[in-house]
Image (cartoon, coloured by chain):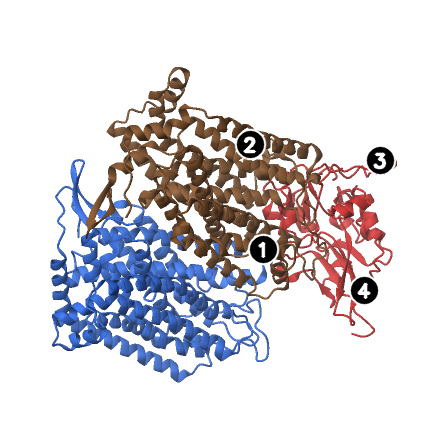
Amino acid sequence: MYYRRTLTEAQINQQLLGTVLTTPLWWIVLVSLLGIVVAGAVGAVGWMINQGLGVTGLRQPVFWGFFITNFIFWVGISHAGVMISAILRLSQAEWRRPMVRAAETMTVFALMASLAMPLVHAGRPWRIFYWVFPYDWARGIWPDVRSPLVWDPIAITTYLTSSMLFVYTALIPDLAIIRDRSTGWRRSVYGALSLGWHGNPRQWKIQGFAGILLSALILPVFVSVHSIVSWDFSVSLVPSWHVTIFAPYFVIGAVHSGVSAVVTLMIIMRKLYKLENFIWEEHIDALARLLMVVALAWMFLFWLDLVFALWLREEQEITVWMLRMFEPPWSWLFFLFFMFSFVIPVPLWMFRRVRRSFTWMLWTSLLVNFGMFLERFLIIVPALMRKGPQTFTYATYRPSPVEFTIIFGTIALVCFLLLIFSKFFPLIPLWEEKEGQLLIDHVKVGNVYVPALVKEH
Amino acid sequence: MATQTKPQSATDRSTAFKWSMVIDLDRCTGCEACVVACQSENNVPINEESAFIEGRAFEWIRLERYWEGEWPDIKARFIPVLCQHCENAPCEPVCPVYATYHNNEGLNVQVYNRCVGTRYCGANCPYHARQFNFWEPVWPEDLRHQLNPDVTVRTRGVMEKCSMCIQRIRRATRSKTPSDIPDGAFNPACVQACPTSAMTFGNLNNPESKVSKLQNDERRYHMFEHLGTAPTTLYLKQVDTHGA
Amino acid sequence: MAHEEHAIPQVPTHQEIASDIMARFQNVNQRYWSWVSLLALLFVGGIVGFVMRLSDGFDDRSNWGYYTATLSFLASTFLAMPIISAGLRLAKANWRRPLTRLTENMAITGVLIWFMLIPALIALPPTEGRLSVWFDFPHWMAFRGGNLMVWGTVVLIGLFLLWLLAVPDLAAVRDHMPASPRGKLARVLSVGWTGNTRQWRVLHSGALLFGAFYLLLYPTLQTLLQADFQAGLLPGMKDAIAPATALINALQGAVGLTLVVMYVMRRFGGYERYFGIDQFWALSKPLLAFSLLWFYFWWGSFITFWYGRQPGESELIRFMVLDSYRYPLMVSFMLNFIGPLVALVWNPVRRSIWGPTIVGAGVLVGALVNHIRWYVAPFSVPDPPAGEAWPHVLPEIPAGQLPGAADALIVVGGIAGAVLLFMLINKIIPVVSMWEVGEGLRLVKVRRFLARYAMVIAKSH
């Protein structure tokens, strides 16, 4: 039987604020390395804008490739934040506490990375203004609201804004703690950011209420974001895209990859910032259980997608699926995708020992996300290739080095931003931890102590 | 594209004109004269070998070859494919900036200035009729003066496709009433160039025009009819006289 | 276990609970019998309606639309009930304890549902020339054998769970009333339960394992239902989300039914102390979630069809949404989505007895209407002329079909039969689980928390 390690409030402050108040060498090294990669990607974008999209591997008819794959991938990752914080907060799952902030922050940065993708992908990025901002009297024409590409920026910017608010609301009490522990200009910055927080009951009440309210309001946004991304595909006529299941399939797939990303993030964070006292086997275990349910639901929807794709026995649809599943190199990618995001990790997670092993969980969660990237790629590219009996311009797609650079750049960007964030704000909410300590109790059942919880009704 | 002349009134033109093309596959010899004519009329960039290797060749109208039947009972077929100017066009509702829309003469038109290059329309077009300017188009020095002044030279990053030679339509119909325009008075470049008269162009709203009469031909079919895109371009099936 | 915030909560002892439940279980009063006879009468009426339909034969499939709608409604609400307890048990929700048994007892209706499936299967047209998930399987094996097997497995697992989880209580019944016939039955059913550690371990792991099986198999049943009885009969119906929508609708209906049953048992059975505000409040949240998901899934399918604008799709939209089945859709839309949304976003409504109950009853009505839309419509599509393959586009849009007298008898009788079975089983197996509630009591302690008293409930990792 395990006992919760209890920490005093002073210990919590000291251990969690360590990252903010000191700057270790590895941090500087890591940030500079990631910065170089990001700079490389920015350079690649500049080169691409300067030369034209010809530098990518895109060609007719594969008009969408790595950028859109990456866009979906990062929107998917961003679903972690809300899944973890909003849903678990509303359902009062106690084990959410150490991971909420990191997950929410990752949401924000992942959304930023994803937003960059369609902009980069557009043929004339300097005119993107006409797409995203509707207020354009000069041309006398508004964006076409029928287009899912208009819903996309609306949904994603709403999600980004509300996620930032969400992070900020939860950050206020911690900012006040840092304010009280810093001096000079930092004190005034943190002081301004903490909005005069003193921790009186009224402030706590408002802060708690805001958290619950934002959780509830953000949920529909959360579902709509990836649904709208999926409708980019399913409202089209492209064979294998035009399926009704895409919206929930994308959302649940996004949760699958997002929660896996949280697992990865938590394990790396634990190692880097020595958070052994806060992130335990139990937390990863709970995440892995959640992942199992999510993965099964996702597989059910995948299976429905496949069955009903073949339902009408349309030649085009069948050829796309044949291409995806049986023709190399796509069949290899499909095999990897299927193994990585389902067949290998899910049975492994059935074992308690795997769920409670940081090493295993790190690698399986990374596998899932690698597989999910492939999944998005396989949804987009083979369908656009359209190797059908009546389609003539059949072409394959191979991403160019420029595209690879930009993809790696977004990964580096998210890590970079997370590291920068951790320098200024604690990645684990101090007040959540303290609140958690307060609500913990044990009940003696027979001759063992079972951890118990005071539920706020 | 020609400068937009304001029509007398929108309803006027929509009742007056509905442009359509009929392609008789029995007459088509696959000579590709239409492709060359289109290329020079519409300032379509020259496709060098590299363009084909890259898979980024520009052909507003192209000759597609396909096979019918199984070996040894197999036939090589070809068919000119161009924008079908669908009435229920998949490319139109997906464009966020109205760069492609249906005008009041039954044409699916592309406004280059609005296009930001999301390429959604191209992804959604089942006919693969849309081409994207991956590079800034360049012409060899000696062809610079060949460019048609009536047609915009597109820039990098925009979509383009068959416009049914809208510049010719504008020129021919400018300040004229529909009755003043005899059937076949003007034609898009491809129709004009076709040596076997396999292509016919005309006004569907004129019941006396050739295209109107061909609409009821027993060999008629639309490409990918099952998709419900309702193309205005009509094909007349090739009928084999020897063997089945 | 109503929970007062400012008073010191009273935790009853296991003994108290057990003897209370046993007393209610033993008491079979006049009112019970009158309800049972009324339901039996309605059920007989349903059989009459069935015989009327049977005399018309199976050639005209449209006769069997309402019958299939009843079947699917029962399979989607009553048969989905064990999912609630299995899911909540997997999630270790403590408030589930009083209500698990009633959801499991609903599995008994599976017997009726399985037999009802047979005529519906006979009414299906042959496989040749039409679309199905069975591809080239021979007809008898695919539609009939396959469906009967999958449904049978679901029903059997449900019954097994019902029995397995009732064994400790059956042992209690055996010990309490050894002389009565019910006690004798319980002696047989309790298979020598003495409550030793090994037996408990088997019970717990069996419950988890078979609960998980049920959770995995039930979606398959819904998929078959949607594919074979709906999509296969509707030309052009390529709706991958339909089974998921049906699953959501089923879960929504199951939660609604649980709420209604809890209310009835509070009101007429005197079970107030078990079905308290905690249970209603907790169940109202998934009800709201399922209502939102119902709309979300419906919309996901609608928008795809709407944008697709292919001939098959626009005809189907006209048939199922805009024209023939407009009113059923509107009713279902109101009761399954708008109503729950408007009512349940308010915490005071959620946190009441009447609020979730009314919404739950509405959801049930909406689900029935939705099932009528889902299955009467495809059954009214005529077969293509002999020898021709099924088209991919609806040749013409059939008009909406209203129920005849026989249909009404079948709908009412089918539901009455299911409720009847539930009422009967409740007198063989106590409707509140004594051991599960008792187990919960051992995990609870009362503790002072800040200025008040709170109940602390243990939750093992």
Q: Are marks 1 and 3 on the same chain?
A: no
Within 10 angstroms of label 3, few (less than 14), some, or many (20 or more) residues?
few
* Front-most of residues B5 and B117: B117
Residue at mark 4 to residue at mark 3: CA–CA distance: 37 Å
* Quadrant in which residue A48 is drawn: top right
Within 10 angstroms of label 1, few (less than 14), some, or many (20 or more) residues?
many
Residue at mark 4 to residue at mark 1: CA–CA distance: 43 Å
> Given this view, does label 3 or label 2 mark the residue nearer the observer?
2
**Circle 4 SS class:** loop
Task: Name above or below for residue C341 compared with residue C425.
Answer: above
- On what subunit does the disc labeled 4 rest? B
- Labels 1 and 2 touching (C-beta < 8 A): no
- Labels 4 and 3 touching (C-beta < 8 A): no
Name the residue that disc number 2 marks. A34
Name the residue that disc number 4 marks. B26
The colour one sees for chain B in the rendered image is red
Task: Name above or below for residue C183 compared with residue A457.
Answer: below
Residue A238 visible (yes or no)? no
The colour one sees for chain C in the rendered image is blue
Name the residue that disc number 3 marks. B144
Name the residue that disc number 1 marks. A334
* Quadrant in which residue C387 is drawn: bottom right
Query: Could you tell which of marks 4 and 3 lies nearer the N-terminus?
Result: 4
- On what subunit does the disc labeled 1 rest? A
Tell me the amino acid under the disc marked 1: Phe
**Circle 3 SS class:** helix
Whole-percent x and y of residue C183? 16, 74
